[in-house]
Image (cartoon, rainbow, N blue to C red):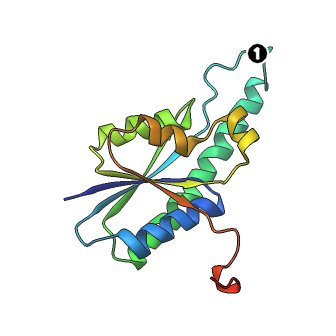
């Protein structure tokens, strides 16, 4: 059995990533782990950021977002007859949480989306997909979200 990790969030890029995996790569017998990495608020000090009450609200909102993604992914798995499960973990660095989870499930492949940030923004903020690619011990597929239709271009 092949273990596939598909990292998801609530973005259109993430939705495309899951659709691409199903359309182009999925094989019967693959075990698919859909992973959502929730926001980490553990090191926020009282004077550094949101109030404790606001942090609780943010955590609640993040859990609601995860539940919405889980419901969608579960339906997609059911509609496509895919043996898959949804998982939510919390991590300070999303890329690190993805790598650690991939090790815990003995993933054979990691599938991540790419937001297509510009070079300057990517240099300052870093790219989750690039960090996963750099640190992974297994193959990584980075799904580039199409910003335009190729059918309108002549090649």
Q: Residue at x 39, y 34 (%)?
A: 100
24 on left or right of 41: left
Percent x, y of residue 103: 32, 38
- Categorize mark 1 by other alpha carbons within 10 Å: few (<14), some (14-19), many (20+): few
Viewport quadrant of the C terminus:
bottom right
Asked if 129 appears above or below 131 in the picture, the reply is below
Quarter location, residue 48: top right
Percent x, y of residue 4: 33, 56
Q: Residue at x 56, y 67 (%)?
A: 16
Q: Could you tell me how many numbered marks the image carries?
A: 1
Viewport quadrant of the N terminus:
bottom left
Residue extending farthest to the left is 1
Residues 51 and 151: in front is 151
Q: Residue at x 65, y 54 (%)?
A: 115
Of helix, strand and loop, which one carries label 1? loop
Quarter location, residue 102: top left
Percent x, y of residue 152: 71, 85
Percent x, y of residue 63: 59, 46
Residues 73 and 152: in front is 152
Residues 44 and 131: in front is 131
154 on left or right of 87: right
Asked if 42 appears above or below 19 in the picture, the reply is above
- Label 1 belongs to which residue? 46
Quarter location, residue 59: top right
26 on left or right of 64: left
């Amino acid at each position: 059995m092949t273990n596939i990790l598909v990292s998801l969030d609530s973005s259109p890029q993430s939705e495309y990533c899951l659709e691409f995996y199903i359309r182009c790569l999925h094989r019967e017998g693959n075990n698919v782990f859909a992973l959502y990495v929730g926001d980490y608020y553990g090191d926020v000090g009282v004077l550094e950021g949101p109030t404790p009450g606001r942090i609780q609200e943010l955590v609640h909102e993040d859990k609601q977002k995860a539940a919405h993604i889980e419901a969608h992914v579960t339906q997609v798995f059911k509609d496509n007859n895919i043996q898959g499960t949804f998982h939510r973990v919390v991590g300070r660095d999303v890329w690190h949480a993805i790598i650690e989870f991939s090790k815990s499930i003995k993933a054979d492949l990691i599938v991540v989306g790419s937001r297509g940030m510009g070079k300057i923004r990517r240099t300052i903020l870093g790219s989750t997909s690039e960090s996963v690619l750099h640190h992974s011990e297994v193959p990584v597929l980075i799904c580039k979200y199409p910003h335009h239709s190729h059918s309108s271009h002549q090649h």
